[in-house]
Amino acid sequence: MSPEMGSNNILKHNPEMSGKTNASGVIDPVTEELAGRVREVGNQAIWSLSSCKPGFGVDQLRDDMTETYWQSDGQLPHLVNIQFRRKTTIRDICIYTDYKLDESYTPSRISIRAGTNFNDLQEVEVMDLNEPSGWVVILIKDDNDRPIRTFMLQIAVISNHQNGRDTHMRQIKVHSPAEDRFGLHSQIVPGRFVTNEFQRYATIR
């Protein structure tokens, strides 16, 4: 299934995402994290790539800097593998691309796959991109329209703009829905800590 896309190829039609854009009208996943609406869970996973140029690998993809990037070095499709130690709820994947800088290195079609391991991955989403610059938000849902629970995600670059061979991705964030103890989407509550750092110390071990 291919979600309907708005300007800048950012998903804007979903009610959950409304009212959460920055001054330029583009969804900002960092703002979502700081507001406690989602949790970035990529740091709980093991990341690997199908290929990369030296110095343009996982570290650059996860350094929170849009000036750096992963550059593949091989044949399509180019793969980003994200393996969790335990079954994890995933709401969306956010990918930062910049066609103005990367041109033919910019992905034009991305496939998202999920499963238990490399042997049972199934495609759960496909997105076509048209010269994207900024964050692309890909909502990941199951057949019941709920965030999926999975041990592994794979992001596959199926094709690039201008039939480019290698690809650039500048950042990837993986979000889990932030829910309170009553199962409702969390809101900012005075005196309540919602960041990952605070939540580590929320219970007595």
Image: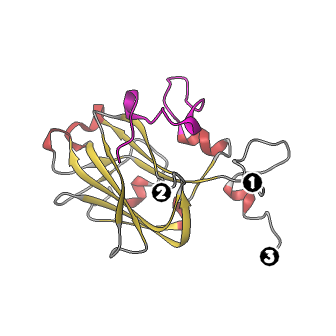
Name the residue at the front extreme.
Answer: 144
User: In the structure shown, which secondary structural element does the residue marked by tag 3 occupy?
Assistant: loop
Dot 1 or dot 3: first in sequence order is 1
Cα distance in 3D space between marks 1 and 2: 21 Å
Residue 102's place in the image compared with 144, above or below, is: above
Q: Report the span colored magenta.
A: 1-28
Identify the disc placed on residue 205: 3
The residue sitting at 29% across, 35% down in the picture is 99
- The location of residue 174, given as percent across then percent down, is 50, 54
Label 1 SS: loop
Dot 2 surroundings within 10 Å: few (below 14), some, or many (20 or more)? few
* Residue indicated by mark 1: 180
Measured from the top left, where is residue 149 in percent x and y? 53, 64
Q: Residue 163, located in which quarter of the rendered image?
A: top left
* Residue 19 is one of the magenta-drawn residues: yes
Dominant SS of magenta comes to: loop
